[in-house]
Image (tube, rainbow, N blue to C red):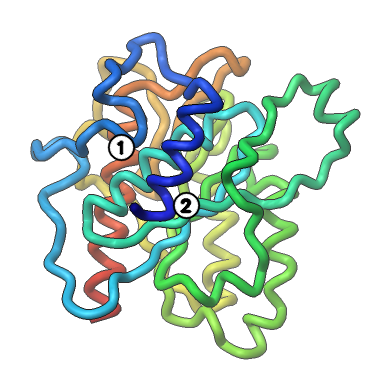
Amino acid sequence: MSNYRSQINTYQQGRQPQTSSSSFSSEELPGRRRPSNSTQGASSGPIQVTGRQPVVFVIYYSMYGHIERMAMEVCAGVEAAGCECRMFQVAETLSSDVLNKMHAAEKNRQVPIIKVEQLAEADGIIFGMPTRFGSAPAQMRALFDQCGGHWRSNALIGKPAGVFFSTGSLGGGQETTALTAVTFFTHLGMIFVPLGYKNKSLQNLDEAHGGSPYGSGTLAGDGSRQPTRLELQLAQTQGNEFGKVVIKLTR
């Protein structure tokens, strides 16, 4: 069983996943649902991998659970492509007192905190983050700021990188949040892999949804809105297409 599946199975036993108003059936919960094989879904079948299985890290920060929920679907897509997926979260920088006043959700203790030296172990990394005034939040930036050693040693050069995000509204940073992360990727020599328009649901105008060609996304509103089926599908697509790129680059 993969690292990701172990984390999700443990997560399901001790914590109720957050779902949208269009709730999933039990077969569709993380760890149980099968990635879609339709042209609109995430997977068109895994690439045959010979030799070592590529490893993708999904590293996220989630204050209210939206990004954590998206991360699960990104991981499902990565694994459907034929990669091993390992999920991490970044360290919290706010005090428990501040978090309580902000009514932040309890952290998932089954997902380990990433250490900066571990980044070099991945064949590709996808970062998930909520926006903070249209850019990456301080918690994610704190990880970025620790990468001076990787910058000096060129440890991350050539590694694929992607990003997914959560904002309060359509105009809250569905593109700028990703763009602020791209500057980090560029200085470290990483290869930015965007979502693009492989999944045509991104162009759906029948409902409000997150996501942009830069990456999958969700709209949190006041916090009560949870990722929708469409947004979770886009997250799977991103993970799947990213995984395919990683496999091609590690052959």
The residue at the point 43 percent across, 75 percent down is: 159
Q: How crowded is mark 1: few (under 14 residues within 10 Å), some or many (20 or more)?
A: many
Quick one: 208 or 51, which is closer to the camera? 51
Left or right, 164 with reference to 140: left
Residue 63 x %, y %: 66, 33
Q: In this view, does 103 lie above or below 60?
A: above
Residue farthest bottom in this picture: 153
Q: Is residue 188 above or below residue 112?
A: below
Residue 246 x %, y %: 30, 69
The residue at the point 20 percent across, 36 percent down is: 34
Cα–Cα gap, marks 2 and 1: 12 Å
Q: Which of marks 2 and 1 is nearer the N terminus?
A: 2
Tag 2 and tag 1, C-beta contact below 8 Å:
no
- The amino acid type of the residue labelled 1 equals Leu
Left or right, 198 with reference to 58: left
Dot 2 corresponds to which residue? 163
Q: Is residue 231 above or below residue 56?
A: above
Residue 199 x %, y %: 21, 40
Describe the element under mark 1 as helix, strand or loop: helix
Left or right, 96 with reference to 81: right
Quick one: 108 or 165, which is closer to the camera? 108
Describe the element under mark 2 as helix, strand or loop: strand
Left or right, 157 with reference to 21: right
Q: How crowded is mark 2: few (under 14 residues within 10 Å), some or many (20 or more)?
A: many
Dot 1 corresponds to which residue? 234
Which numbered dot is residue 142?
A: none
* Quadrant placement of the C terminus: bottom left
Would you identify the image quadrant in which residue 65 lies? top right
Residue 87 x %, y %: 49, 51
Quick one: 245 or 3, which is closer to the camera? 3
- The amino acid type of the residue labelled 2 equals Val
Would you identify the image quadrant in which residue 106 lies? top right
